[in-house]
Image: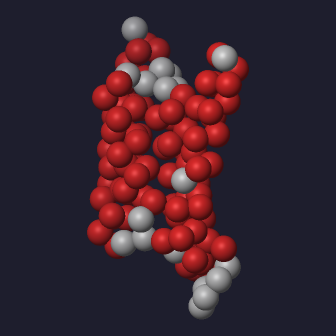
């Protein structure tokens, strides 16, 4: 059972990709896509998958506390929808999360 739970934690980020493809068909190379749009959605998808994975597993550079896990999941959720407002909020939340976690994990390693 422990292996099943851990594999679900690892794979949970992959469940987000179909929703991103529904919101933005460029991810599946459908519609009128450009290389710039494809690079943008791929970068956004990779960032969202990384945040979902960190939130589900509970580890990035160091173990994540509960507040960091919730904040990472919320920022990943904001990146799933293909609205300009949610993208901006999601990128800002991701930057805050990365800075927050880096400062916390850096101070932990030096202590």
Q: Residue at x 61, y 24 (%)?
A: 5
| Residue 23 coordinates in the image, percent (x, y) | 48, 71
| Residue 80 coordinates in the image, percent (x, y) | 45, 60
For residue 76, side relative to residue 50 (left or right): left
Dividing the image into 4 quarters, which one contains the N terminus? top right
Residue 61 visible in the current orientation: no
Give the number of marks.
0
Q: Quadrant of residue 53?
A: top right
Residue placed most toward the observer, 90 or 73: 73
| Residue 11 coordinates in the image, percent (x, y) | 64, 39
Residue placed most toward the observer, 88 or 83: 83
Q: Quadrant of residue 67?
A: top left
Above/below status of 57 relative to 27:
above
Residue at the far front in the pictured view = 1
Q: Residue at x 65, y 16 (%)?
A: 2
For residue 16, side relative to residue 71 (left or right): right
Above/below status of 12 relative to 105:
below
Residue 75 visible in the current orientation: yes
């Amino acid at each position: 059972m422990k292996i099943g739970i851990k594999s679900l934690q690892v794979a949970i980020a992959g469940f987000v990709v179909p929703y991103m493809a529904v919101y933005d068909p460029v991810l599946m190379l459908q519609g009128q896509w450009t290389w710039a749009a494809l690079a943008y959605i791929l970068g956004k998808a990779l960032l969202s998958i990384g945040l979902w994975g960190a939130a589900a597993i509970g580890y990035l550079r160091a173990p994540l506390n509960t507040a960091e896990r919730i904040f990472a999941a919320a920022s990943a959720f904001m990146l799933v929808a293909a609205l300009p407002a949610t993208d901006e909020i999601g990128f800002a939340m991701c930057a805050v999360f990365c800075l927050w976690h880096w400062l916390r994990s850096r101070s932990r390693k030096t202590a």
